[in-house]
Image (spheres, helix red, strand yellow):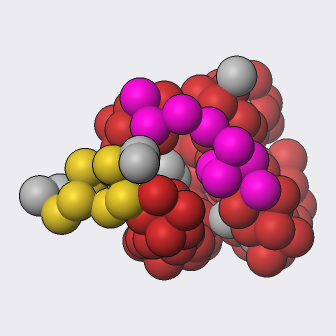
Amino acid sequence: MEVFEKAGTAYSGANGREARVQNFLTVNGKYFDNEQLVHLRERLYSISEDRFSMLGALKFKSPGTALALSIFFGGIGVDRFYIGDTGMGLGKLFTGGGCGIWAFVDWFLIKKAARRKNYEKLMAALL
């Protein structure tokens, strides 16, 4: 019988695997799109316990924080630097947010961009 340890609680067998995947998705679901969560659930079920325990060290970027940064500091690219888009952050910094137009457009795009970056980070960790 497989036994999984998570935060002092022992999970065993298929129910343990389901519990740890559900726990991960409950805690971190806000960092991903709903379409991504379906794929993530399947991937998380298939990984080993060793790899799963490493996922706890990942730090995801909050889409809400990215939006707040975009609203208040988007003209200088802070939102893009926050999510890890250094090139786009520099572009916004040197153009004043595309004379404000790029900064305004990012108010509507930055949350999805943050979720995409989180998904890419998690997929890289699962490989």
Q: Farthest residue toward the front?
A: 1
- Choose top left, top right, bottom left or bottom right for residue 19: bottom left
Magenta-drawn segment? 42-50
What residue do we see at 11% from left, 58% from top?
8
Residue that sits furthest to the left in the current view: 8
| Residue 127 rendering spot, x and y as whole percentages | 70, 22
Determine which quarter of the picture holds residue 30.
bottom right
User: Is 68 on the left or on the right of 45, as rendered?
Assistant: left
Report the front residue among 116 and 97: 116
In the depicted view, which residue is nearer to us: 17 or 101? 17
Residue nearer the viewer, 94 or 32: 32
Query: Relative to 66, is 98 above or below?
Result: above
Residue at figure coordinates x 71%, y 62% from the top left:
41
Out of 7 and 82, give the one closest to the viewer: 7
Q: Residue at x 46, y 58 (%)?
A: 13
Task: Measuring from the top left, give residue 4's x and y in whole percent.
Answer: 33, 49
Rendered view: 25 above or below 126: below
Residue 84, x across and y down, in percent: 61, 34
**Where is residue 121 drawn, in percent x and y?**
63, 35
Q: Is 35 a magenta residue?
A: no
Horizontal relation, residue 27 to residue 78: left or right: left
The majority secondary structure of the magenta stretch comes to: helix
Note whether residue 69 is visible. no
**In this figure, what is the number of numbered marks?**
0
Q: Residue at x 62, y 37 (%)?
A: 47
Whether residue 37 is visible here, answered yes or no, is yes
